[in-house]
Amino acid sequence: MKDISPPEVWMRGPISGIIQILQPVAHALLQASEEVSVIMEKFHDDLLWTKPAGVASVGFHLRHMKGVLDRLFSYSRSEILSEQQLTYLRNEGIADPEITHAELVAAFQNQIRVSIDYLKTIQEFQLTEVRGIGRKQIPTNVLGLLFHAAEHTQRHLGQLLVTAKVLIQ
């Protein structure tokens, strides 16, 4: 049987409005969005906070991926984290039986859309501008923050996919 799934996002060409050097960031984020949608279609809310073998739950990964994108993109704009962002960070791993996996997926996908829209505003000269991370204002640059946001999302996507597959087997 022939595979009818579309090619990975990076193989479909450039994302309109995003400078060439940031295409890999956009591709990684959009790929994460698509893969989360597929794996979470068959997921059950009663498994959302389950930690098989003590690993992080699917709920945590969904919250964390959204939160990391929000925080790292804020740093890339030279913003300090708001109290709302800090509260979100503190609550990422706390089970909430009132929330559904569909709500967490929608929140993550919305953050992807916000992130892609932001990438469209960045010009190449901004990529080397120095930014500070956290209370200590650890120095990095805009490109480093955006690249880390993409790779960190992909890292947690992989963990989410494995955890979800183990749980829905």
Image (spheres, rainbow, N blue to C red):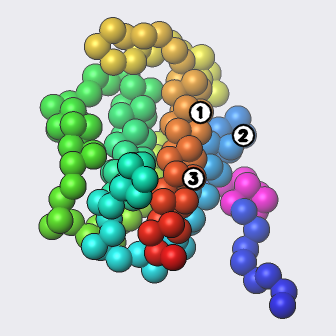
- Residue positioned 44% across, 27% down in the render: 76
Q: Nearer the viewer, residue 15 or 48?
A: 48
Give the side of residue 149 with respect to residue 108, left or right: right
Quadrant of res 81? top left
Badge 2 is on which residue? 20
Tell whether label 3 touches label 2 (CB within 8 Å): no
Which residues are the magenta region? 9-15
The answer to whether residue 100 is above or below residue 121 is below
- Label number found at residue 158: 3
The answer to whether residue 81 is above or below residue 105 is above
Question: In the rendered structure, which amino acid carries the disc numbered 2?
Answer: Gln
View extreme (bottom): residue:
1
Task: Tell me the distance, in whole angstroms, between the alpha carbons under discs 2 and 3.
Answer: 25 Å
Question: In the rendered structure, which amino acid carries the disc numbered 3?
Answer: Gly
Asked if residue 39 is among those painted magenta in the image, a careful observer would answer: no
Question: In the rendered structure, which amino acid carries the disc numbered 1?
Answer: Phe
Disc 1: CA contacts within 10 A as few (<14), some (14-19) or many (>=20): some
Q: Foreground mark, 3 or 1?
A: 3
Note whether residue 36 is visible: no
The answer to whether residue 47 is above or below residue 121 is below
Pointer 3 or 1: first along the chain: 1
Q: In the structure shown, which secondary structural element does the residue marked by tag 2 occupy? A: helix
Q: In the structure shown, which secondary structural element does the residue marked by tag 1 occupy? A: helix
| Tally of numbered tags | 3
